[in-house]
Amino acid sequence: MNIILTMNLIDKEFFNRNKKLLLIALIIVFGSLIVGSLIGYFEAGDSYGQMSQMIEFAHENNIPSPINNTATDTSGLEYFIHNFLIDIMTMIGGFLFSIFSVINVLQSSFIAGQFIGQDFIFGLVSTLPHGIIEYLGTVFALTIAFIITRAEIRIIRTRSLDGLKRDFKDILLLLILDIIFLAIAGCIEAYVTPGIVSSVFGI
């Protein structure tokens, strides 16, 4: 039903209206992720790859892995709710001209990038399976914030509510996409990623 509703919300001009905002959001999310990864790599220094080494050492010596010690029974729904609440805050930030939305996204993506950069093998294996989908959801959330800000600026300039219906339709479409992507990412993070990590490191 959500897929049918999403298709009905897409019109020919949707991407033309929002492609610049989507592109800016994409650059902010993945750009800060890449920068964070590079900085994390250089900051790690001699401790680079420490997690992978610890896992390998634990496996070779038949002792509990650090992954097992920190593992949780977090469900896909819990991951979804956590990430969706963060995205909701990003969207709401659009009413404050997206300033806090951009800051929050830059910070969270940068920190995630630092984690990956300190141990690319472990970072990518434990993040990439669900991370790409999750961060695309963040792109949608940030674009919603930008659309809200664009509407605010237009109303201030023109003192007219023209275009609000179209903006609401675009926001609803992006919101549905965000929910779908975060739901998929949450399930992968909870039920697929741990198995991939275990397979790669043989634990």
Image (tube, rainbow, N blue to C red):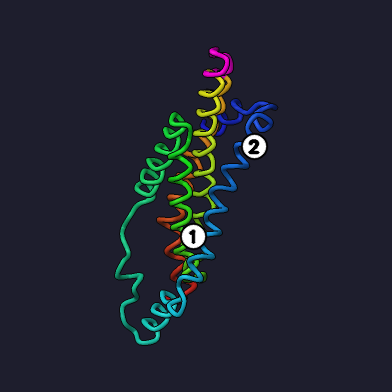
Residue in front for this viewpoint, 121 or 61: 121
Tell me the residue at 40%/46% (across/down).
83
The residue most toward the front is 157
Q: Which amino acid does label 1 sit on?
A: Gly
Which residue is the site of mark 2? 20
Look at the image and give the residue range highlighted in magenta: 156-165
Circle 2: is it few (<14), some (14-19), or many (20+) Cα within 10 Å? Answer: few
Which residue is the site of mark 1? 113
Q: Which mark is residue 131?
A: none
Q: Earlier in the sequence, mark 2 or mark 1?
A: 2
Examine the rendered structure and indicate whether residue 41 appears above or below residue 139. below
Check contact, mark 2 vs mark 1: CB within 8 A: no
Tell me the residue at 43%/70% (across/down).
198
Residue in front for this viewpoint, 12 or 152: 152
Q: Where is residue 114 in the image (x, y as percent from the top left)?
A: 46, 63
Q: Where is residue 133 in the image (x, y as percent from the top left)?
A: 53, 50
Residue in front for this viewpoint, 99 or 94: 99
Tell me the residue at 63%/32% (across/down).
18
* Quarter of image, res 154: top right
Q: Is mark 2 on a helix, strand or loop?
A: helix
Circle 1: is it few (<14), some (14-19), or many (20+) Cα within 10 Å? Answer: many
* Quarter of image, res 60: bottom left
- Image quarter in which the C terminus is found: bottom left
Examine the rendered structure and indicate whether residue 56 appears above or below residue 109. below
Examine the rendered structure and indicate whether residue 22 appears above or below residue 173. below
The residue most toward the bottom is 61
Q: Which amino acid does label 2 sit on?
A: Lys
Examine the rendered structure and indicate whether residue 203 appears above or below residue 60. above
* Quarter of image, res 67: bottom left
- Asked if the magenta segment contains residue 199, the reply would be no
